[in-house]
Image: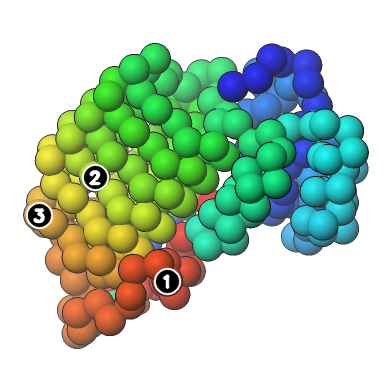
Amino acid sequence: MTTAGTGWVVLGAGGHARSVVDVLERSGRTVVAVSGDAPGGEPWHVDVLADDRAAFELISARGLHAVVAIGSIAARTRLVHELVSRGLSAPAVVAATATVSARSVLGDGTVVLEHAHVGPASRLGRAVVVNTAAVVEHDCSVGTGVHVAPGAVLLGGASVGEGSLVGSGARVLPLVSVGAGSTVGAGAVVTRHVADGDTVVGAPARRPDHRPAARVAPGAPDSRPPGGTA
Ligand SMILES: CC(=O)SCCNC(=O)CCNC(=O)[C@H](O)C(C)(C)COP(=O)(O)OP(=O)(O)OC[C@H]1O[C@@H](n2cnc3c(N)ncnc32)[C@H](O)[C@@H]1OP(=O)(O)O
């Protein structure tokens, strides 16, 4: 994490970007610009750069910090990797109201939004989103790009593989693992292992009726349906 008062560029200009800009400003940081297509609605109060290239140029030229605030797991992960590989600053961002254990590890480009919690001995990879009021309990493992949606809970020792979505309000029970590129539906209660690329819903969580077993290879996480956006 960095000192408040240093300028930030937010890559993304959609709904998730609005939440992340709010997090930065509420914790005293200055947002210089957002980038990308801004959907309709409330106009931005900061500069809107045309695209990611313009954002990279501004970040490099002025030595600013960057945060990627794009709902698409694949796009978010790719941009965080690119920022880091170019040696640009993309530290984890933690909201003022979030609680994050000093004995947890957050990867570059990970964001922890308002009222969320990350417990001790948990390890979160790059480009993870712990969304509003979500909980990652102690001893969890959370892979690169994972989105723990608002109000979702990973209980002690749970793990979620790279590129997965844990939908809003879902619970993953202690020590249970969710594979890579998987989707846990909103409100699900995951009681046993979820295979890579699978989708599960309900309590206890099961594959939706009539849906075949996953054929999605891990590493292709964005082949999932809408709902993974933040
Ligand atoms: C700030 C933010 O807003 S972050 C947003 C984070 N996003 C979320 O939390 C959304 C998570 N997404 C979901 O829960 C989605 O419903 C998904 C991904 C599980 C399923 O989406 P789709 O693949 O489009 O499935 P679809 O809507 O066709 O439903 C398939 C079946 O599953 C059922 N189903 C879908 N979602 C759920 C759910 N969460 N719980 C229980 N049943 C569900 C449907 O009713 C349907 O059943 P039917 O075949 O008997 O009619």
Closest to the observer, 201 or 178 = 178
Q: Which residue is mark 3?
A: 192
**Mark 1 closeness class: few <14, some 14–19, many ≥20 residues within 10 Å:** some
Disc 3 marks a residue whose amino acid type is Arg
Please state the horizontal and vertical placement of residue 14, each as a whole percent of the image. 69, 53
Q: In the rendered view, would you say 198 is above or below 141? A: below
Q: In the rendered view, would you say 230 is above or below 62? A: below
Please state the horizontal and vertical placement of residue 111, each as a whole percent of the image. 53, 36
Q: In the visual, does 149 lie left or right of 93?
A: left
Disc 2 marks a residue whose amino acid type is Ser
Q: In the visual, does 136 lie left or right of 190?
A: right
Q: Residue at x 36, y 23 (%)?
A: 104
Please state the horizontal and vertical placement of residue 179, each as a whole percent of the image. 25, 59
Q: Which residue is mark 1?
A: 220
**Mark 3 closeness class: few <14, some 14–19, many ≥20 residues within 10 Å:** some
Q: Secondary structure at mark 3?
A: loop
Q: Secondary structure at mark 1?
A: loop
Q: Is mark 1 within 8 Å of ligand 1?
A: no
As drawn, the label of residue 11 is none
Mark sitting earlier along the chain (2/1): 2
Ligand 1 falls in quadrant: bottom left
Q: Is mark 2 within 8 Å of ligand 1?
A: no
Q: Which residue is mark 2?
A: 159
Disc 1 marks a residue whose amino acid type is Ala
Do the residues under discs 1 and 3 have CB atoms within 8 angstroms? no
Q: Is residue 128 in view? A: yes
Mark 1 or mark 3, which is nearer to you?
Answer: 1
